[in-house]
Image (cartoon, grey):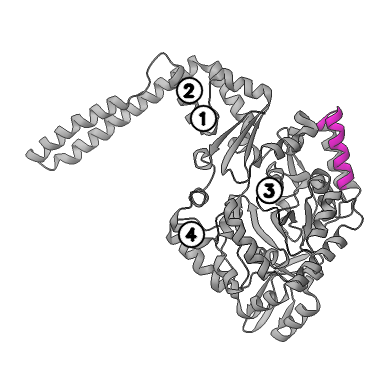
Amino acid sequence: MPSDCIPFRDTNYFSSLICDYLDQKAELSPFYHRFPKLETFKAQIEEKQQSFPQENREALVASLNKQYQGFSIAEATAQNIELLKQKTTFTVITGHQLNLFTGPLYFLYKIVSTINLTRVLKDKYPGYDFVPVYWMATEDHDFDEINYFNLFGKKIQWNRNDGGAVGTFDTKGLDKVFEIFSSEIGSGRNAEYLKTLFEEAYLKHNTLAEATRYLANELFGDYGLVIIDGDDRELKRLFIPYVERELTEQLSYQHVMPKTKKLETEGYKVQVNPREINLFYLAEGLRERIIEEDGKYFVNETNISRSQPEIIKELSEFPERFSPNVMMRPLYQEVILPNLCYIGGGGELAYWLELKDYFKAVQIPFPMLLLRNSVLIQTEKQAEKIKKLKVSDKELFLKQHELINRKVRRISNIDINFDLQRKYLIEQFKSMYELAAQTDVTFLNAVKAQEVKQLKGLDMLEKRLLKAQRRKLSDHVKRLTTIQNELFPNQSLQERSVNFSELYMEYGERLIPTLIEHLNPLQGEFLVLKE
């Protein structure tokens, strides 16, 4: 399968913060611990090995075995869970919401990046073992972000009114979604597999967390993927000391807030601002912020209140009721896992970059941060059309009007570029400015106004000529816009919109092995895959 690579910066779809991080700009060095290069993992391994307690490994394995009860576990996954007991075993982790039927394509890319990094590390450091982990965001409560997926340009949505952590949601009503999906996906071998996969996951499991575990396990179990649910009483018991300090000292706010201000000073947009207390309270149908006022603790939008001794006692007895938010969840992950590296998208890495000082304050090693692989997949037909249009892969990432204008200029028999005329006009006005300054300086504004007017006139004329040429070349423009719209739905990246089922219809069981073969997690560039 041919491929092409494009620097992330050249795609214009990634923030300056992420592009500068990938370029290892000196200004960002205070915001991360070690940059993810193969040779730097040795020091990360040694640091984590020294700091991660054996009792945490035992608790982790016990919880994982309990979470997998009732599921058919692939041999590779079962071996990896057992390996986690050993002090020479480490994890690489990615996290994702419980999007319906995996949601956008990048769900797959996150996990493939994670699996492939563990393989690369094993080749480099054969004396250690490395386990790929998918963290299910079962405690998230933003149901509207996960209750749909796109199929052939249509939105397939699951509607319900429950509140609280989405992982506990029952799967009632998904039979209706299955009916819509079945009618849209059509027939054939690949379609029948997808129908069976959806049905087994969502109609034969009781909760969204169970359904998602089944789905991810079916797709990636043979590659040794370990799936973890952080909404676990025994795992949260390991996190009690950090939750208590958050409640009593507001430690994350103290150490994250200066970092966010520093990022702003450097000219970057802050992804997430910390709260005074970065915890939620969990109960059936409820996940609400914990707020402290005058030594008392309140659960937002409820009548629940506790004194400090009461809430510390409740934490000790019922740690499962305390849920870390986006600022504290990274710490929770690193406390319960022997982790070396977090793999995420640009938005995720942006908030991780705020956390280094917080980790230092609680004496937990800060993991390496790796941008997940990004991929644009072209079918054989699409690749052939692009070749005939004589458009480069890099040009496809341009805004549509830029792409069209560039193409029209290239194939037009008229040179519709007035840069030379603009330069000539500006030179002419320089002498007029000098003349005005020698006669009456009040004429300077009049000269400036005339210059602006004439330059605008050139711009307008250039646009009119381009528009005329576009009409003449309408067929070519139409084919160009059609192929770009196919590859960039709604002028966004394919991976942020399209569901994997569309590509599975095209590639079938080759899809995931092909991604495993071609995605290099340490390459640091946007990948274009062609049939």
Classify the position of the C terminus by image quarter.
top right
| Crowding at mark 3 (Cα within 10 Å: few <14, some 14-19, many 20+) | few
Q: Quadrant of residue 453?
A: top left
| Crowding at mark 1 (Cα within 10 Å: few <14, some 14-19, many 20+) | some
Amino acid type at circle 2 is Lys
How far separated are the C-alphas under marks 2 and 1? 9 Å
Q: Which one is in front, 271 or 348?
A: 348
Start-end of magenta stretch:
185-202
Q: Residue at x 17, y 34 (%)?
A: 430
Reading the chain from its start, which is encountered first: label 2 or label 1? 1
Q: Residue at x 73, y 61 (%)?
A: 88
Q: Position of residue 231 (x, y in %)?
A: 78, 64
Q: Which residue is identified by label 1?
A: 395
Q: Position of residue 45 (x, y in %)?
A: 65, 61
**Numbered circle sitting on residue 407:** 2
- Residue 93 makes an appearance in the image: yes
Q: Residue 145: within the magenta? A: no
SS label for mark 2? helix
Residue at the front extreme, as displayed: 127
Reading the chain from its start, which is encountered first: label 3 or label 4? 4
Q: Residue at x 46, y 17 (%)?
A: 411
Amino acid type at circle 1 is Glu
Frontmost of labels 4 and 1 is 4
Reading the chain from its start, which is encountered first: label 4 or label 1? 4
